[in-house]
Image: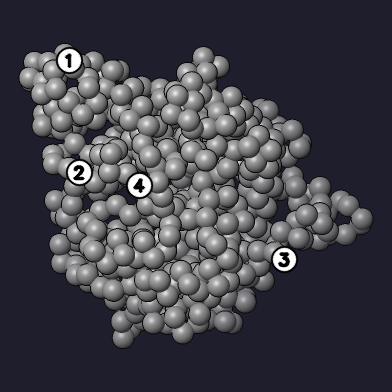
């Protein structure tokens, strides 16, 4: 089956409270996907955003983002009132996520909701600590990560949200007595963070079940690394490369490439792969099993890092000082498959690819990714549609690329535009002149690129929502290496119109994709 889908972050959905969430607009978007004949809704990581507002720099590899909790649902449950929602500042611009306003406004509302929920629970059965059965089931099923996460967030709150490396030594070193005393004195704060995860879980399961019922699968995203400022790093110990003082010895990034002349210095701690192997990759099995409990398919970010990864000495100012190291390769994926069976994984195999990376992808059997914006630099480029294989996923661009409209107008070189115009037959001439290329409209180029992606032999084609809408640079989700201003685009109210759904369905049907 030739499948098709749309990339649309939950955060980019419209709505009244500063960011997209699991409310009515999410369900309406599922309806739109079904009407458009789509098989897949691809989203970005659902984890809490961290440094630079990035979902790839989260405080937890397992927790969900409290920003996605639908406040209208909390109001319907009687946990918050309309006046509170009206008076709270969630950000002034409806088409942009204001993460600063969200941090202040959202958590204030969520704390009110928790207080109301606790009061309601305490009033039942004459018991001060009674909770619904669903809550107990959730905490029991997720206790392997939830307990540490809630304690970690309570400690962050008590330490003005500073990174755990800046906490008092007993907390930083996880002194048992100190943590037990803090936990005993901060049960309400710890309970607040558990409540948020419970609400996230309830609401997301409702959205996912609705999507699956409509024949739409959820394609989630698994970042390869965890953040240095995360509960995973705080509790991980030997899971990561440490120096003689117990600090992170080296950090993650990538060498100079298409996106950055200095490379990218991500700063994530690197895994101690020998230790992971000695445990049978237990932490990875737990992590992937959790991901597959909330998604139907998983895109594994920076797949090449499992073959060879760029290791940068801690304290470096740029990624140029790094060097290549060897990852776990198939040993990890054999362990994962041994524990869970065949894995519905898509490998993000972009960047500088060594022959060994290609070999790992082939051995794994996972579909890799093809990106049309990389296809027109010259020569018989592997990203050109005639070179695609069935076992891959084709994108016009990823969340790191700009939109097709902006690519054609600003980002593509003259050479790339000429090659694209010729390859896509955007002009009458097979070898168009500069003047002929300049006469090609942005919309014509955008539609041609989308149609080339849909016509690819790739089993799956994923088109970002902003490319279907023809939006420019304002919808560019992430510019690698740029701090601030990313992950902020939101769609206009009513973007998912019936006429657009019909157009998308027909474009996909021409290429025998969809349902």
Q: Residue at x 55, y 37 (%)?
A: 39
Front tag of 3 and 1: 1
Q: Secondary structure at mark 4?
A: loop
- Neighbours of disc 4 within 10 Å: few (<14), some (14-19), many (20+): some
Q: Secondary structure at mark 3?
A: helix
Question: Which of disc 4 and disc 1 is earlier in sequence?
Answer: 4
Identify the residue position indicated by label 3 in the image: 140
Identify the residue position indicated by label 1 in the image: 428
Question: Which of disc 3 and disc 4 is earlier in sequence?
Answer: 3
Question: Which of disc 2 and disc 4 is earlier in sequence?
Answer: 2
Name above or below for residue 235 compared with residue 26: below
> Is the Cβ of the residue at disc 1 closer than 8 Å to that at disc 4?
no
33 vs 101, nearest the viewer: 33
Identify the residue position indicated by label 2 in the image: 381
Identify the residue position indicated by label 4 in the image: 389
- Neighbours of disc 1 within 10 Å: few (<14), some (14-19), many (20+): few
Q: Position of residue 196 (x, y in %)?
A: 63, 51
Question: Which of disc 1 and disc 3 is earlier in sequence?
Answer: 3
Q: Secondary structure at mark 1?
A: loop
- Neighbours of disc 2 within 10 Å: few (<14), some (14-19), many (20+): few
Front tag of 4 and 2: 4
> Is the Cβ of the residue at disc 3 closer than 8 Å to that at disc 1?
no
């Amino acid at each position: 089956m030739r499948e098709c889908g749309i990339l649309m972050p939950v955060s980019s959905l419209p709505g009244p409270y500063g960011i997209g969430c699991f409310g009515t607009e999410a369900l309406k978007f599922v309806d739109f996907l079904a009407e458009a004949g789509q098989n897949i809704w691809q989203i970005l990581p659902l984890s809490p955003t961290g440094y630079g507002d990035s979902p790839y720099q989260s405080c937890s590899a397992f927790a969900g983002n409290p920003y996605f909790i639908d406040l209208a649902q909390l109001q319907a449950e009687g946990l918050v009132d309309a006046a509170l929602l009206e008076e709270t500042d969630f950000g002034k611009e409806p088409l942009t996520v204001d993460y600063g306003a969200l941090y202040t406004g959202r958590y204030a509302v969520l704390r009110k909701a928790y207080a109301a929920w606790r009061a309601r629970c305490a009033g039942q059965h004459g018991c001060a600590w009674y909770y619904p059965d669903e809550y107990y089931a959730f905490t029991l099923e997720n206790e392997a990560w939830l307990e540490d996460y809630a304690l970690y967030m309570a400690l962050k709150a008590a330490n003005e949200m500073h990174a755990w490396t800046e906490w008092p030594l007993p907390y930083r070193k996880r002194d048992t007595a100190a943590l037990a005393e803090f936990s005993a004195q901060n049960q309400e704060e710890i309970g607040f963070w558990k409540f948020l995860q419970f609400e996230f879980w309830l609401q997301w399961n409702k959205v996912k079940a609705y999507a699956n019922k409509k024949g739409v699968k959820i394609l989630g995203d698994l970042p390869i690394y965890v953040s240095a400022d995360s509960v995973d790093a705080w509790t991980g110990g030997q899971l990561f490369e440490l120096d003689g003082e117990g600090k992170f010895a080296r950090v993650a990034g990538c060498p100079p490439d298409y996106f950055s002349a200095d490379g990218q210095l991500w700063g994530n701690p690197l895994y101690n792969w020998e230790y992971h192997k000695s445990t049978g990759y237990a932490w990875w099995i737990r992590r992937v099993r959790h991901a597959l409990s909330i998604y139907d398919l998983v895109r594994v970010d920076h797949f090449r890092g499992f073959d060879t990864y760029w290791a940068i000495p801690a304290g470096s100012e740029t990624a140029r000082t790094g060097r290549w190291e060897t990852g776990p390769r198939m040993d990890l994926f054999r362990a994962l498959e041994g524990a869970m069976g065949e894995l519905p994984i898509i490998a993000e195999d972009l960047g500088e690819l060594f022959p060994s990376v290609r070999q790992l992808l082939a051995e794994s059997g996972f579909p890799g990714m093809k990106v049309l914006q990389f296809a027109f630099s010259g020569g018989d480029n592997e990203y050109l549609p005639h070179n695609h294989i069935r076992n891959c996923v084709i994108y016009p661009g990823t969340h790191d690329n700009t939109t097709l409209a902006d690519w054609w107008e600003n980002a593509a070189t003259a050479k790339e535009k000429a090659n694209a115009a010729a390859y896509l037959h955007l002009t009458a001439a097979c070898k168009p002149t500069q003047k002929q290329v300049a006469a090609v409209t942005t919309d014509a180029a955008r539609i041609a690129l989308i149609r080339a992606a849909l016509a690819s032999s790739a089993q799956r084609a994923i088109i970002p929502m902003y490319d279907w809408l023809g939006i420019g640079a304002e919808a560019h989700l992430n510019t690698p290496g740029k701090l601030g201003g990313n992950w902020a685009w939101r769609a206009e109210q009513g973007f998912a119109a019936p006429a657009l759904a019909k157009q998308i369905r027909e474009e996909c049907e021409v290429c025998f994709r969809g349902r």
